[in-house]
């Protein structure tokens, strides 16, 4: 679990800046576990193209059947 990292992704610069502010203010001791990127999912490149799990508010109904 020491290598656990979370990547927060949003296209909005306002959201990204607010995440950065909130994390540095409320959880500064674990901020290094969070990578906050301003981008769209389809525009990611490099090492950020691979991940184990995606959590999206688009799946707010908890459907795991691909619909």
Image (cartoon, rainbow, N blue to C red):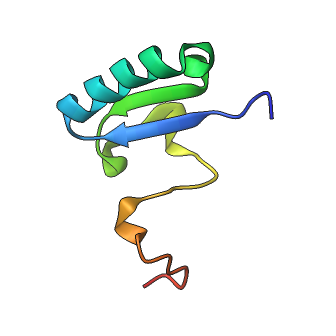
Q: Quadrant of residue 58?
A: bottom left
Q: Residue at x 20, y 30 (%)?
A: 13
* Residue 16, position as x, y percentages in the image: 29, 30
Of residue 44 and residue 26, the one placed in the foreground of this image is 26
Residue name at image x 29 percent, y 45 percent: 40
Question: On the image, which quarter does residue 31 sit in?
Answer: top right
Q: Is residue 12 above or below residue 22?
A: below
Q: Residue at x 70, y 34 (%)?
A: 4
Where is residue 34 drawn, in percent x and y? 53, 28
- Residue, x 42% and y 59% (percent of image)? 56
12 vs 66, left or right, is left
Whole-percent x and y of residue 62? 50, 76
Quarter holding the N terminus is: top right
Give the left or right position of residue 25, taking residue 54 as reference: left
Looking at the image, the residue that sits furthest to the right is 1
Q: Is residue 44 visible?
A: no
Q: Quadrant of residue 17?
A: top left
């Amino acid at each position: 679990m020491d290598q656990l990292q979370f990547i927060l992704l949003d296209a909005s610069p306002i959201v990204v800046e607010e995440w950065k502010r909130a994390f540095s203010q409320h959880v500064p001791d674990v901020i290094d576990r969070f990578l906050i990127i301003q981008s769209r999912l389809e525009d990611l490149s490099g090492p950020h193209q691979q991940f184990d799990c995606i959590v999206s508010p688009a799946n707010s109904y908890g459907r795991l059947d691909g619909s």
